[in-house]
């Protein structure tokens, strides 16, 4: 009952004209109350159990570190005729090893994935057999390294060292994007550079590190079988070996490092935003938040006040993690927009869900999608520029000690900043009794949310702004599609991308029109219909070009970019396309009513696709 | 406990799920992840095992060879992956910058049997998927050269490793361990996690929306209500896990012992669901219950994974077809834990039911 009294005291304080600090004091009061309420709720009987669980977690982590992960135990069956080799293979839990004599092995070869006879490995032709062979190969390489690392004459064991010099190419983004390969034709003559030849000094023939330092590093990576130690190794990137590698170490960095890294940073954020989500939802249960809404406190102050403790908490957790990992504080820069993005979505999810299970499902769905968006591109952190669409890539780069530019920062975070701002705005506009306590279905509620963000007095300006601000979301989804289709073979990925991009754009443009139509079908006279379509098209185009200018400067800087995005001569073409698309949808709504919305949308998508196909194909040929 | 009462509750919960279309979200989620797992298959696993990358390009890359002659040049020229040109270092690097070359290799004047190691400098393009492929292909050639050099210097080694002759892999088997040893067990136990979160929602909702009183005024007892919710969530397990198996099979991933896997997953999932139920009955408030439950779940999963022959490992073994008699022992253990938790749930629910009656 304690919190009910607190609630009344807020009403009293914020209603007090003597305390005219206004919004700022409202925000701090609400923030303080939010913290107190959470703490009283937590301390009752959650905290003791939470502490017990935390202690258990530490114990279990210790146990797991000692015993190892037993997920893949006994996947393969191996028969061996020699004790030493059997012990060698059996040291990997993935193998169930049977030591039998040669004759038995040969007779029962089919029931094994691998058999080893007189030091020769024979693999079965099944997928499992091939995989077992690869695993044995890797295990054996590790074992030989172990033996070689003990050698006194290290340079007899490791006679070859490779020093990788990275060279920055001027064309890198577009060259791989448009499927253009690194030089193609086999020529009888060596290629001749066209541009200026800068003098490259001949590399020194000796390693710049002493033998004992190398041995130290080699034994360190020998212990690094578990994923966790590999991860800590990456963090201390200033290892003595630096860029010198033996041939077997020559491969792109494994993604496990980034997987663990990302979960270390994202999981606490996800967890904290759950609490925020729940706090918003709690205000709505049984109209508990009615008191708060009936005070003269502005909706924006309530929202900011409620979000503030979680925002500070998330920042504190991230900063703590950065300190713990001894990473540079710069790591927080790309995390801030991600935190805002999580909070904005948590707020909206808390506002639209009707029940706990809906809340759970939407939040699981959101976190899966968001984590994929953040996580998948960053796998390619060291490999491809596409990785930059995720802010987490910047974190990985910071940890590695690689510098990134302001353009990179804008490119990967601007969508997060913009979408969070728009979502917060929508939430503030809708933070009222009517929306919070309604029991309508999810889609209807989302439509109402959009409707409230439109102004009735200036419908065309609203449509213009709505479409302009929807661009970051469109880009986000399109980037997601790009990531998903990135791996498909070339023609399919392009075709799927064209279809999905068209569908997403047409759908987004139709949202405003559809909402206006449902609210007031009488509004759509033919004149208004044309005007509304025009406002939508212009808003969409302006938003698109503005954002491209900011974020994709990497592309727009190049020759191709200026052709694609900037020349004003071609600007009327996309405008016409956007207008036609949304006009088709609007007409089908006017003529056929709401039933015709989906067919209209499909027709618009088809037009959009044809345009893109013509444009791209024409451009290619 | 009456079967009719249970089925009333189960039906009620399913109706709720369908009315809110949350079930639609669950299906969407599953499809989304399925879509991403195809991405995972190619993208992630090619990174997981970079040597599989090189199979995606049947392509002759042009490399420049600078500096002193060596056996390495011979290997490069014999390779079907490369065209080699002898060049001066500076123009070669300039050509690389213009993408007219895939890589530049500089070899110094170090004798194969020298005391010092041979240090090769490899110039490659930064941040490029193709240069990653080129590096993977070069790795094989460097390995051959390393073997030669090691042979030349072998008398200086004090110990030789136990010899094992491994045939050159004929390709394939790259995704196997990832799919069967990670993806399948994780995907099949995801429904259990969703279902246990759901049972907490269903129970705390009755408390927080104050609908419990109405429900208690019907002939349905409190324990029956709890078990109805548990069973509703449990029913979702074989459906969702079955859908996963079907999606995987459609994707061309052969899975052995499908019925046994479903049996194991369904029975094992009862354990987290009952833990969720007990947490929800104790806290009667969603935030606290979900928080405690998810923390507990992390502890339990971590502990279970550290045990040999755990249920997740068993799914892997069943799916690849190497599970033996031990699966029945594990199953018996799981059933025993489930039974213990069931008794606890029943006792707790009866106790709460009595409290409701007296108040």
Image (cartoon, coloured by chain):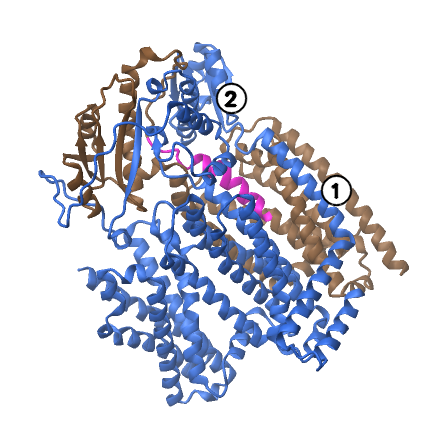
Chain colours: A blue, B brown
Tell me the element at label 1: helix
Is A69 above or below relative to A333?
above
Where is mark 1, residue-wise? B341
Return the x and y of residue A579 as percentages of the image width and height: 33, 78
Q: Tag 2: Cα neighbours inside 10 Å, few (<14), some, or many (≥20)? A: few
Observer-nearest of B269 and A202: A202
Residue shown at 57% from the left, 60% from the top: A362
Return the x and y of residue B39 as percentages of the image width and height: 41, 48
Dominant SS type (magenta): helix
Q: Which residues are magenta?
A: B171-191
Q: Quadrant of the C terminus of chain B?
A: bottom right
- Whether residue A189 sits left or right of residue A38 in the image: it is left
Residue A21 marker: none
Is A92 above or below relative to A371?
above
Residue A91 marker: 2
Q: Tag 1: Cα neighbours inside 10 Å, few (<14), some, or many (≥20)? A: many
Image mark 2: chain: A
Image mark 1: chain: B
Tell me the element at label 2: loop
Q: Is residue A604 visible?
A: yes
- Residue A93 in magenta? no
Residue shown at 46% from the left, 62% from the top: A416
């Amino acid at each position: 009952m304690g919190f009910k009294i607190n609630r009344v005291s807020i009403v009293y304080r914020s209603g007090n004209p003597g305390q005219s600090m206004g919004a700022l004091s409202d925000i701090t009061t609400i923030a303080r109350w939010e913290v107190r309420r959470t703490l009283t709720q937590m301390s009752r009987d959650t905290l003791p159990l939470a502490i017990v669980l935390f202690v258990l977690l530490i114990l279990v982590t210790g146990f797991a570190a000692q015993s190892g992960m037993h997920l893949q135990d006994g996947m393969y069956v191996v028969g061996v005729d020699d004790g030493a080799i059997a012990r060698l293979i059996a040291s990997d839990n993935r193998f169930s090893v049977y030591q039998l004599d040669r004759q038995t092995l040969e007779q029962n070869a089919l029931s094994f994935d691998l058999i080893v006879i007189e030091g020769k490995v024979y693999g079965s032709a099944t997928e499992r057999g091939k995989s077992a062979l690869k695993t044995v190969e890797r295990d054996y390489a590790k074992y030989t390294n172990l033996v070689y690392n003990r050698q006194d004459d290290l340079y007899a064991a490791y006679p070859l060292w490779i020093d990788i010099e990275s060279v920055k190419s001027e064309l890198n983004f577009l060259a791989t994007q448009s499927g253009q390969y690194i030089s193609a034709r086999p020529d009888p003559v060596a290629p001749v550079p066209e541009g200026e030849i800068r003098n490259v000094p001949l590399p020194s023939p000796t390693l710049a590190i002493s033998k004992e330092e190398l041995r130290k590093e080699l034994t360190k990576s020998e212990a690094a079988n578990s994923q966790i130690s590999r991860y800590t190794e990456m963090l201390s990137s200033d290892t003595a070996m630096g860029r010198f590698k033996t041939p077997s170490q020559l491969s792109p960095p494994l993604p496990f490092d980034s997987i663990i890294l990302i979960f270390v940073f994202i999981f606490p954020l996800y967890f904290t935003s759950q609490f925020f989500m729940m706090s918003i939802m709690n205000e709505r249960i049984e109209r508990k938040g009615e008191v708060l809404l009936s005070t003269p406190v502005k909706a924006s102050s309530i929202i900011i006040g409620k979000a503030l403790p979680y925002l500070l908490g998330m920042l504190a957790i991230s900063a703590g993690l950065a300190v713990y990992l001894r990473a540079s504080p710069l790591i927080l820069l790309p995390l801030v927009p991600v935190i805002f993005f999580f909070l904005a979505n948590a707020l909206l999810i808390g506002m639209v869900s009707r029940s706990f299970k809906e809340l759970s499902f939407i939040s699981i769905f959101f976190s899966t999608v968001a984590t994929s968006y953040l996580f998948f591109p960053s796998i390619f952190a060291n490999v491809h520029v596409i990785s930059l669409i995720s802010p987490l890539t910047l974190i990985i780069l910071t940890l590695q000690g690689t510098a990134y530019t302001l353009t990179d920062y804008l490119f990967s975070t601007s969508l997060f900043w913009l979408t969070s701002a728009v979502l917060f705005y929508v939430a503030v506009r809708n933070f009222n009794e009517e929306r919070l306590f309604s029991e309508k279905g999810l889609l209807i509620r989302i439509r109402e949310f959009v409707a409230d963000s439109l102004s009735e007095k200036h419908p065309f300006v609203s449509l213009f702004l709505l479409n302009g601000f929807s661009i970051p979301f469109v880009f986000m989804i399109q980037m997601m599609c790009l990531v998903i289709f990135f791996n498909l073979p070339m023609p399919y990925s392009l075709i799927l991308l064209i279809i999905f991009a068209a569908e997403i754009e047409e759908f987004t443009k139709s949202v405003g029109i559809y909402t206006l139509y449902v609210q007031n079908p009488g509004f759509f006279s033919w004149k208004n219909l044309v005007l509304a379509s025009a406002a939508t098209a212009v808003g969409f185009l302006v938003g698109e070009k503005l954002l491209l200018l900011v974020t994709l400067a990497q592309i727009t800087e190049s020759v191709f970019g200026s052709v694609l995005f900037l020349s004003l001569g071609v600007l009327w073409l996309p405008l016409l396309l956007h207008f036609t698309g949304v006009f088709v949808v609007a007409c089908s709504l006017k003529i056929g009513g709401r039933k015709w919305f989906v067919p209209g949308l499909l027709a618009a998508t088809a037009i959009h696709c044809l345009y893109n196909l013509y444009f791209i194909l024409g451009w290619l040929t | 406990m009456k079967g009719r009462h249970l089925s009333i509750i189960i039906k009620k919960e399913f109706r709720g799920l369908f009315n809110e279309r949350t079930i639609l979200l669950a299906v969407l989620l599953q499809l989304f992840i399925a879509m991403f797992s195809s991405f995972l298959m190619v993208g992630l696993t090619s990174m997981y095992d970079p040597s599989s990358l090189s199979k995606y390009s049947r392509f002759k890359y042009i490399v420049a060879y600078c500096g002193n002659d060596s056996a390495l040049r011979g290997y490069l020229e014999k390779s079907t992956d490369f065209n080699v040109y002898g060049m001066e270092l500076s123009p070669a690097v300039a050509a690389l910058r213009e993408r007219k070359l895939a890589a530049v290799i500089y070899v110094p004047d170090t004798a194969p049997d020298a005391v010092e190691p041979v240090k090769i400098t490899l110039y490659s393009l930064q941040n490029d998927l193709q240069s990653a492929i080129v590096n993977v292909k070069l790795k094989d050639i460097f390995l051959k050269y390393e073997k030669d050099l090691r042979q030349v210097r072998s008398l200086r080694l004090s110990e030789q490793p136990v010899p094992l002759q491994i045939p050159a892999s004929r390709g394939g088997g790259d995704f196997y361990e990832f799919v069967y040893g990670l993806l399948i067990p994780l995907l099949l136990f995801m429904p259990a996690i969703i279902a246990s979160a759901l049972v907490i929602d269903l129970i705390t909702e009755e408390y927080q929306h104050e609908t419990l009183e109405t429900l208690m005024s019907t002939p349905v007892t409190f324990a029956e209500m709890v078990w109805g919710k548990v069973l509703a969530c449990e029913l979702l397990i074989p459906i969702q896990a079955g859908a996963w198996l079907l999606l995987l099979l459609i994707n061309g991933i052969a899975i052995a012992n499908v019925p046994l896997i479903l049996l194991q997953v369904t029975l094992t999932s009862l354990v987290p669901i009952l833990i969720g139920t007990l947490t929800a009955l104790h806290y009667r408030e969603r935030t606290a219950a979900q928080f405690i439950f998810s923390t507990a779940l992390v502890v339990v999963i971590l502990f279970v994974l550290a045990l040999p022959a755990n249920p997740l490992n068993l799914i892997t073994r069943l799916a690849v077809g190497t599970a033996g008699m031990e699966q029945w022992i594990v199953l018996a253990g799981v059933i025993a834990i489930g039974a213990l938790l069931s008794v606890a749930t029943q006792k707790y629910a009866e106790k709460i039911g009595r409290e409701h009656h007296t108040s």
